[in-house]
Image (spheres, rainbow, N blue to C red):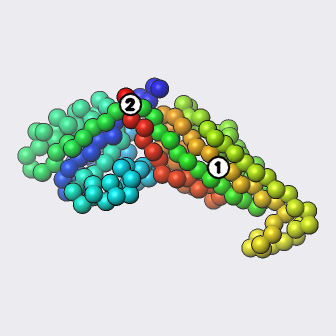
Amino acid sequence: MDNGNFVHLELHGSADEVKAFVEGFRLASGEQRVYSTVRENIKIDGFFGSLISRAHGSTHFVVPSGFSIRLAEAVEAATLVDIRVESCQSIDHGELDFEFKCFSRADGVAIREVVETELPLGVVVEGYETEETVDSDAKGSEMYSPVHEYVLTGRGRFHGSIEGIIALGRRLDDQDFIHPGRIHLVYAG
């Protein structure tokens, strides 16, 4: 899959120093596509692996491979900060699970549009299931009632380029009824 050749870069050192170094290097280089795994809700190594990484002073990013090479050279040359490259893995693609539930036909139409038609280039939806229930006996029930005239539920997984998945994750975070999981990185070979 053409993913624009992105890598998962793990840097070891004080989190504040690492973030400041990467941000300074990003600004100096003009690169716009530097993603913090924390800010973008990208899953790394599971829950315990994430705790271990933090305890050992690791900070994770998703960056273009060319940028990672230049950044690694700058890290090697740095003498004022104690930072080192811990690992660098090529990313094949990203995956993002989601689910939703709403009680209004208008919200259902909006959700379906976001999930089914407004996908970033290179992103597809897999395992997409919906269930729509109409109960005319519940007509007139209030929003917080245990019964509703209309209920739409669904779930699925987005699969595609890491940039597309990150953009989609950001957009889903802004939706009221769609609940995205954490972005999962799938590594190359």
Q: Quadrant of the C terminus?
A: top left
Q: Amino acid at mark 1?
A: Arg
Residue contact between numbered discs 2 and 1, judged by CB atoms under 8 Å: no
Q: From this view, report whether residue 101 is shown above or below residue 3.
A: below
Is residue 28 visible in the rendered image? The answer is no
Q: Position of residue 164 (x, y in %)?
A: 51, 37
Could you tell whether 33 is left or right of 152 in the image? left
Determine the residue positioned at 25% across, 52% down: 58
Q: Amino acid at mark 2?
A: Ala
Could you tell whether 101 is left or right of 169 in the image? right
Q: Position of residue 115 (x, y in %)?
A: 65, 44
Residue placed furthest toward the left: 79
Determine the residue positioned at 85% across, 57% down: 134
**Disc 2 designates what residue?**
188
Spatial CA span between label 2 and label 1: 26 Å
For marks 2 and 1 on the same chain, the one whose residue lies earlier in the sequence: 1
**Res 124 → quadrant:** top right
Determine the residue positioned at 9% across, 50% down: 80
Q: From this view, report whether residue 104 is shown above or below residue 160.
A: below
Element class at badge 1: strand
Is residue 164 visible in the rendered image? The answer is yes
Q: Position of residue 37 (x, y in %)?
A: 38, 49
Residue density around tag 1, few if under 14, some if 14–19, many if 20 or more, within 10 Å: many
Residue placed furthest toward the top: 2
Q: Position of residue 13 (x, y in %)?
A: 18, 53
Determine the residue positioned at 17% across, 38% down: 74
**Res 178 → quadrant:** bottom right
Q: From this view, report whether residue 51 is shown above or below residue 127.
A: below
**Disc 1 designates what residue?**
155
Element class at badge 2: loop
**Res 8 → quadrant:** top left
